Structure formats: C-alpha cells, structure tokens
C-alpha cells in the first residue's frame, strides 16, 4: 500500500513536470480506470493534484465565508448564474471556477460569454481582489490552478478514460480545493441526460466526492437531482442568460428557483450565515425577490468587463444578447393533440441545440451564442392540439431537425403532477 501511495505521489509529480510521456500517463490512468483506487488513495491523488499548482489563500477576515458549487452537468442548467450572485448578496464569498459546454451539456462560461465584453479569463490575483471586494467572480480555470488536471483530463478525454469514479473525483475536487473554499455543494445529476444515467452510479460518485472533499477539510453536501427534462424553459447560451436574469429578479421558473434556493441554503448553513438549510434557502429567496442578487450580478458583470447597459430593459437585453437580428430565425413547434405534457426529453432538445450550433463536440470548437430553444410548457401542463410547445431560434435549414424536437414532447391523456428534481442527499 505504501508503495502504491508513493506511486501516486510520483505519478502526479511526473504529470506536472512533464517527465512522464503521454503514453505512460495514459497507461497509469488506464490502471486506475480498470482497477479503481481505495478511498484513501483517492484522497491522496486529489491532494497531490490540488498541490500541482496555486492553492488560493484568502485574507483571514473572509476565509471562513468562501464557498462554491459544482454540477455534473445538464441541459438548461443555469443554476450557477443565479446562485453565485445570490450567495454573495447573502454575505458568502464565491470564487466560482466553471467550465465550457461539451456534447449535450452546456457550460456556464459559454453562457456568460453571451454578454458582450464579459471576460472569464481573469488571473488568480484579480479573482482574489474581485471576490474580496464584491463577493463573487465567475471565471475559467487559470493556467496556475491544478495544471496536473489539465494534462490528465485532456488525455482521459481522448483515451476514453473519463467515466471513472476516482478520476472524476480527483479532477473535480482538486479544482474546488485549489479555490481554498470552506464549503461545497455538489449537484450530482442522474437520468437520461446526465453523465451518470443510473441513480446508483450517481450516488457512488457523490459519496466518493463528498468523502474526499470532507477529508480535505471542506464541508460538503451532495444533492442527487434528476436530469430527464431540461431545467427551466430556456436551452441555449443567450436564452439561458435571459432566464437567469428572470430568476435573479424573482421571476424564474419553479424548478430553477428550487435548485438555487436549496443549494444556496445548504451553503449558507455550512458557513454559519444561516441557522439551518431552511433559513438559508429563505435568505436566498429574499435576495432574488428584493433585487440584491441581481445587483450583485450587475456588479460582477461590470467587474469582468461586461456591458451592463444591456440589462436596462427587456428590449436592450434581447438586442444585447444577439436575439434580435435579421439573421436569427424563429420557428414555433406545435402540439399534435389535446392532453397533458407528460415528458420533455432533454436529450432530443440538447441534440437539436448541438445541431443548430449552440454546443460543441470538441473542447476547442466554437459556438453560436444566440441559437437555442425556448420551451413554453412544463411537465404536467394541459395542452391543446396546435398550441405552441416550443420556439427554436436558429440560422435557417431547420427542417431536418424538426422531427427530433417534435418527438421531445410527449402528450398523454392523463394528468401528471410535476415532482421535485431533488431526489436525495448524500
Ligand atoms: N468534469 C471535470 O472537470 N472532470 C471530470 O473528470 C469530469 C467532468
């Protein structure tokens, strides 16, 4: 065992200093992929990955308030964009480091970059300054944070080695730990549009990440949430900014608001700003309704170079996000018959969004921020034949994809009560 632990330490060191070739790294990762790691080995791997780069040190007066969340990714998942400013409005400090979208999963950075001028490539020094001053920053991974993960993740991606519980745990938790956070909420999704389709696998990943994060001194709660239907009504980068603004102003869809409030409540409780999760969730809800969360969002946009004047009116917002343009077409999708909406398939909607340019299939690919889908119904909505169920914003040539989006909506004769997305807590 001692030898294996020694091996992990040398492995991460050699990944970072380049003394191991790509082939050797892949061989080592394949061994972990096939044989797994013991829990204490996963902790060691994660610690060594964290220490491969800068670990942020916060000024004493705010260190105990620094929190973050991570979602394993979904369709229409804009929770972070409303949650981070809401947490800051409640007194927490949020240095949120996010990723880009890949495949059918959207990325927070892509969504934020729909805002003209918004920069996500800021330095660690600027991140510390901004979070200390206004309480929130939403940025991409910098060169100096967890360089070992950058090399390992790229090699895993091209070698089919992503779906491994210890490797995912090391990758995600090392990056969160490098932020120097005190508390973390993990939103582990399960369902047909989730990375972990089966609930048991989602729970296994959640337990592993919680165990490692807590072992590194981060107070951690994992939610298991369903990812069968898109979150909220908007899928596509600019459209999701519009919906995030709605949520930040207390007008968001119920499922989005629930995810924001529960995750925010858990974090506020973890750092002692709320007496329990319920109290914390009420604080988050208040921040959405009293304008303070939106105020923090505007401060963040300004601090990161974004054009805040687009948030002056709905007209300015749509125009500023590229949603009013002669080159952007809208096509309505209609219900075939009367009944109730019993299912909205997130995968069909995500595939359509990918086809029309809202997502990317390769890490370096470019995206079209303005295209996407707005869904006008929810699971459980009554619906009449020929009623509009969705509108697709696209650049033309949609006909081949129409069948996909039409078949995403299942209309049945029986009413279906919508259920909470939150399936459990680990
Ligand atoms: N996201 C990450 O950052 N790392 C993984 O291993 C999987 C998803």
Image (cartoon, grey):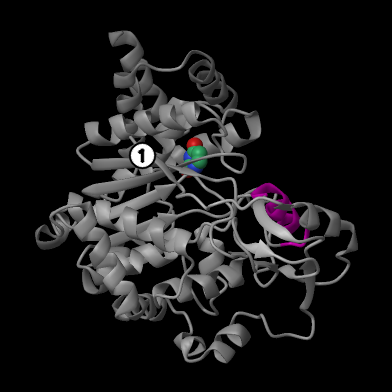
Can residue 135 be spotted in the picture?
no
User: In what quadrant of the picture does the C terminus appear?
Assistant: top left
Left or right, residue 334 beside residue 317: right
Q: Is residue 224 above or below residue 323?
A: above
Q: Residues within 10 Å of mark 1 (few under 14, many from 20)?
A: many
Q: Quadrant of residue 273?
A: bottom left
Does residue 50 appear in the picture of this structure?
A: yes
Q: Farthest residue toward the front?
A: 414
Q: Judge by depth and name the residue closer to the eye, 114 or 238.
A: 238
Query: How many circles with numbers are drawn on the protein?
Result: 1
Determine whether the residue tagged by mark 1 lies in a helix, strand or loop: helix
| Residue 120 lies within the magenta run | no
Q: Is residue 135 above or below residue 116?
A: above
> Residue at (39%, 28%) from the top-left corner?
12
Most common secondary structure along the magenta stretch:
helix
What is the x, y in percent for residue 323? 66, 80
**Which one is nearer the viewer's eye here, 339 or 239?**
339
Q: Is residue 348 magenta?
A: yes
Write down the quadrant of residue 365 in the picture: bottom right
> In the displayed structure, does residue 423 sit left or right of residue 369?
left
Q: Is residue 277 left or right of residue 50?
A: left
Residue drawn at x 63%, y 29% is 160
Residue at numbered disc 1:
173
The one nearer the camera, 218 or 201, is 201
Q: Give the percent coordinates (x, y) of residue 417.
A: 53, 52
- Range of residues picked out in magenta: 345-357
| 34 in relation to 295, above or below | above
Name the spot of residue 300 as percent of width and height, x first. Answer: 36, 75
């Amino acid at each position: 065992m001692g030898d294996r632990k020694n091996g992990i330490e040398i492995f991460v060191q050699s990944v970072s200093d380049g003394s191991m070739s790509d082939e050797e790294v892949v061989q080592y990762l394949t061994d972990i992929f096939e044989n797994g790691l013991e829990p204490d080995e996963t902790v060691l791997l994660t610690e060594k990955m964290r220490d491969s780069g800068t670990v942020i040190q916060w000024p004493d007066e705010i260190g105990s308030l620094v929190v973050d969340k991570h979602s394993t990714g979904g369709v229409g998942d804009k929770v972070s964009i409303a949650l981070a400013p809401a947490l800051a409005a409640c007194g927490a400090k949020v240095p949120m480091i996010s990723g880009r979208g890949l495949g059918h999963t959207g990325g927070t950075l892509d969504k934020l970059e729909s805002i003209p001028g918004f920069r996500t490539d800021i330095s660690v020094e600027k991140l510390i300054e901004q979070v200390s001053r206004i309480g929130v920053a939403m940025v991409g991974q910098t060169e100096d944070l967890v360089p070992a993960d950058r090399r390992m993740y790229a090699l895993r991606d091209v070698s089919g080695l992503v779906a491994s519980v210890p490797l995912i745990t090391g990758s995600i938790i090392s990056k969160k730990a490098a932020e120097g956070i005190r508390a973390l909420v993990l939103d582990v999704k399960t369902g047909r549009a989730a990375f972990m389709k089966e609930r048991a696998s989602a729970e296994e990943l959640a337990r592993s990440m919680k165990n490692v994060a807590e072992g590194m001194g981060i107070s951690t709660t994992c939610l298991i949430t369903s990812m069968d239907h898109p979150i909220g009504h908007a899928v596509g980068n600019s459209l999701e900014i519009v919906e995030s603004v709605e949520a930040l102003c207390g007008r968001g869809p119920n499922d989005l608001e629930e995810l924001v409030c529960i995750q925010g409540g858990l974090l506020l409780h973890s750092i002692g700003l709320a007496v329990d999760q319920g109290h914390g969730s009420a604080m988050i809800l208040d921040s959405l309704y009293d304008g303070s969360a939106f105020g923090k969002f505007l401060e963040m946009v300004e601090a990161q170079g974004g054009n805040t004047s687009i948030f002056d009116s709905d007209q300015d917002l749509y125009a500023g996000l590229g949603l009013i343009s002669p080159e952007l077409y809208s096509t309505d999708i209609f219900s075939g018959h009367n009944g109730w909406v019993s299912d909205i398939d997130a995968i069909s909607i995500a595939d359509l969004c990918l086809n029309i340019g809202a997502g990317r299939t390769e890490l370096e690919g470019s995206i079209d921020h303005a295209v996407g889908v707005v869904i006008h119904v929810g699971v459980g909505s009554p619906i009449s034949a020929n009623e509009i169920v969705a509108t697709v914003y696209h650049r033309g040539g949609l006909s081949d994809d129409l069948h996909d989006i039409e078949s995403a909506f299942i209309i049945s004769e029986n009413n279906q009560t919508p259920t909470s997305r939150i399936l459990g807590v680990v």
